Image (cartoon, rainbow, N blue to C red):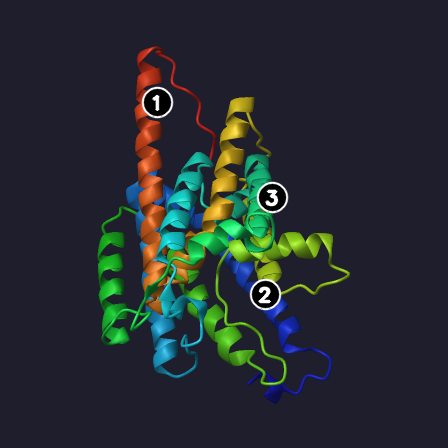
Amino acid sequence: MFETFGFETLTAPQAAVYFALVIGLAFGGLAQITRFCFRRAIVGEDRRQAAGVWLTALAVAVLGTQAAVSADLISFADHRFMAADLPVLAIAVGGLLFGIGMVLTRGCVSRLTVLTGSGNLRAALVLVVFAVIAHATLKGVLAPVRTALGSVTVPLENAALPGNPLIWAALIAVVALGIALRSGNRFGTLIGAALIGALVPLAWVGTGFVLYDDFDPIALESLSFTSPAADTLFWTIASTSISANFGVGLLGGVLVGAFIAALIRGQFQWQSFDTARQTGRYLTGAALMGVGGVLAGGCTVGAGLSGIPTLSIAALLAIASIAAGGWLAGRVLSASSAESGAASTTRPLQPAE
C-alpha cells in the first residue's frame, strides 16, 4: 500500500521509524500513567490491580489483531511466531530466566524503559545491560547457547491454536475483561490500558499493510522490547553504518513519551542504587532477562501483549514460562525476606518501581 502514497524521498523503512516513534510516544505516556507492568501482575503487592490493567490491554489487543487478520489486512503465516518447529526448550528456559530476572530488577523491560524516562537510573543501567546481553545472545558470544537450545524442537501441525481464531479471540477477551472489571481499578485507568492494547493491532496493521511496499519491504512488527533494545544499542554505536529501524523508533518514543508524562504529572524524579548488593541484584536480573528474552522469542510485551493476539502456541508457551519464572522467584525472595525479618524488626527498604 505504501507505494500508492507517491512519496518521492521517504521510503517505507524510513516511514516505519517515524511510525514507531509515534507508537512509542503513546505507549510511554500511557504506560507511565497506568503503571503498566506484567511483573506487578504476578508478584506485586497490588497484583490484582496490575493484572486488571495488563488483561484489559490484552483483551483489546487480541480482538483488534484478529479483526485485522479476519479483514485480510495482515497475515501471520510467515511470521516467526508461526514456525512449524517449536523450539520448546529455548522458549521454556528463556521464559523462566526472563521471569526470574524481572523479579530481581523489580520490573519487566517495558516497565524499566518507562521508568528510565521518569528519571530512574537503576532502570537505565538495567536497560543498557539488558541490551548488551540480548545482543550478545543474538549475534555475539552467547549465540552458541541460543543455537544449542533452539535446536531442540517439537514439530507442530499447526503453530497457532486450533479452531476458529475469532472464537479464541472472543474467549480470551471475555475472560481477560471479566477479571479486569473486578480488579478494583478506576474506569479511567482501564481506558488507558485499553488504549495501550489498541496500539498492538495498530502497529501490526501499520507495518504489515499501510507501510507494506513490494519494492522495499519491511518486517511485520508490533510492540516489543528485546530486539528493539539490541537494535538501539547497535544503532547508537554504529549509526553511520546502519540505519534506524522500527525498533529504534519504538524504544526512543517510549523513553520520550514516559519522560513527558512524568514531567506533566510531576513524577519525574532522579533515583539511583542504595547499596552495592542492590546493584548486583539488578545487574544479575538484567543479564537473565537479556538471555531469556532472546531465547523465549520476546519479553512480556513482545511475546505476551503482542504475541498472544497472534494465537501462536510459541507465544503462549513463552508468556506462561515467564509467569512461572516470576512466580517462583517471588516465592523464593519472599521466603528469604521472611527469614531475615525474623532476625530484624526493621523492614528493609524496597526500591521504587
Q: Is residue 276 left or right of residue 11?
A: left
Label 3–label 2 contact, CB within 8 A: no
User: Callout 1, which amino acid?
Assistant: Ser
Q: CA distance from mark 1 to mark 2?
A: 42 Å
Viewer-nearest residue: 222 or 314? 314
Residue located beneath label 2 in the image: 246
Query: Residue at left 30%, top 32%?
Result: 331
Dividing the picture into quadrants, the one containing residue 44 is top left
Secondary structure under the numbered disc 1 in the rendered image: helix
Near mark 1 (Cα within 10 A), the count class, few <14, some 14-19 or many ≥20, is: few
- Between disc 3 and disc 2, whose residue precedes? 3
Q: Residue 96's x, y, as percent?
A: 37, 45
Near mark 3 (Cα within 10 A), the count class, few <14, some 14-19 or many ≥20, is: some
Q: CA distance from mark 1 to mark 3?
A: 28 Å
Residue 128's disc is 3
Q: Is residue 178 above or below residue 129?
A: below
Residue located beneath label 1 in the image: 337
Residue 187 showing in the rendered view? no
Near mark 2 (Cα within 10 A), the count class, few <14, some 14-19 or many ≥20, is: many
Q: Is residue 126 left or right of residue 236?
A: left
